[in-house]
Each structure stands twice: as structure tokens, then as C-alpha cells.
Amino acid sequence: MTANIEAAWVEDIKIRTLGPERISRPDFRAVAHEIEAGEIYDDGIVWIDAIPVDHLTWPFAFGYRFRTPDRTIVISGDARPSAALLEACNRCDVLVQEVYSRTFIDGHQNPDYHLQAHTSTAELAKLAAKAQPGLLVLYHQPHGWASDEDLVKEVREAGYKGKVVSARDLDVF
């Protein structure tokens, strides 16, 4: 896949490495690493674990847990709730979790796909109540007719009592 992406961008790479917009690294190449579940990075300061997640029939779908000596952040990836995500968070500082609004499903042409591959606000409330993150951040939200405030309200109405925000591009937590 990386080779094909580089082939698709060959003209851009040529201009940026050889033309007037030259960058300092003329040996510009992507370096891909295939991963499996478990620890995928450790520099002694940051540890990253790949978490197998459920995304319909995809055989390899991952969320990630980032650990430092003072903080743990879990990102669900594109996924349904799972025991692996629950275990990865387990009172983590921040859980960044995909979610969809019930209004999105109500008006969708193919609701079965989303019901089987993604996380509803009610499912997320249940997962977060068990995982107990310090902060729950909603992302990858197909809103339907719901606003960010509506998504947070749906999670609350489903029983989640912890801190929760709906993410926007460039937010810092």
C-alpha cells in the first residue's frame, strides 16, 4: 500500500525533492511497519500498545494505548465496544472513543453497518461507566441531526456520569 501511495504522489515527491520547492531530505521515503496486537513502541518514555478492536469483518483493526510515566491515553480507533478497549482504559486518564448519535441511525439508509461496526452513545455510556476514564472524548462522530451538545447529552442520558466532551479539530485536552 505504501509503494502505491508513493507511486500516486511521484510528481509531488519529485517537485519537493528536486524542484524549486526542494526540501532538505532528498531521500524522502515512507517507512511502513506491519504491527500485531501488543506493545509496538517503547523508547523508555512513551509506550504504545496496539489493541485489537471489533470493526465488523476487518481481520486487523486496532485502537491504541499511549502510556507515559504520568498519563495514559486510549484511542478506540474505528470500533465497537469491546473487552479489549475496557481493559486498555481501566481508569485511563483520557479515552478518545468513536461514537454515533441515535439520530444518525434513525435517518440512515444502511443502519445495520453502523450498528455492527461502530459505537452508539448508549453503548459508549456503558463502556465508559465500566472503564472510568478521567475524561471521555467523543470523536469520529457521524452526527445525523445531533449537535456536539446533543451527543454529550445522549451519553449522559444513557447513564454516564464522568467528564465528557465532544472533540473538534485542534482541541487540546
Image: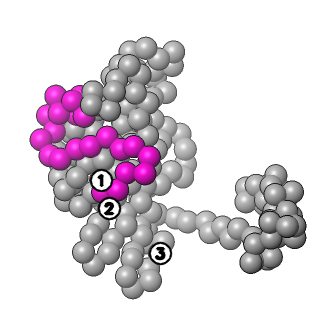
**Residue 75 image offset from top left, x and y in percent:** 38, 54
**Residue 164 image offset from top left, x and y in percent:** 22, 44
Residue at the spot of label 1: 95
Q: Earlier in the sequence, mark 2 or mark 1?
A: 2
Residue at screen point 32% across, 75% down: 68
Q: Residue furthest front?
A: 20
Q: Is residue 141 left or right of residue 135?
A: right
Q: Which span of residues is magenta-colored?
A: 152-173
Residue nearer the viewer, 103 or 86:
103
Asked whether residue 135 is drawn in magenta, I would say: no
Residue at the spot of label 3: 41
Q: Secondary structure at mark 3?
A: strand
Q: Earlier in the sequence, mark 3 or mark 1?
A: 3
Give neighbour class at mark 2: few <14, some 14-19, many 20+ (Cα, 10 Å). many
Residue at the spot of label 2: 73
Q: Amino acid at mark 1?
A: Leu
Is any part of residue 50 visible from this angle? yes
Q: CA distance from mark 3 to mark 1?
A: 19 Å
Residue nearer the viewer, 93 or 132:
93
Q: Secondary structure at mark 1?
A: strand
Asked whether residue 168 is drawn in magenta, I would say: yes
Q: Measured along the vertical axis of the image, is residue 34 above or below residue 42?
A: above
Q: Measured along the vertical axis of the image, is residue 101 above or below residue 131?
A: above
Residue nearer the viewer, 134 or 90:
134
Residue at screen point 87% across, 67% down: 19
Residue nearer the viewer, 121 or 144:
144
Q: Amino acid at mark 2?
A: Ile
Q: Amino acid at mark 3?
A: Tyr
Question: Quick check: marks 2 and 1 in contact, CB under 8 Å?
Answer: yes
Q: Earlier in the sequence, mark 3 or mark 2?
A: 3
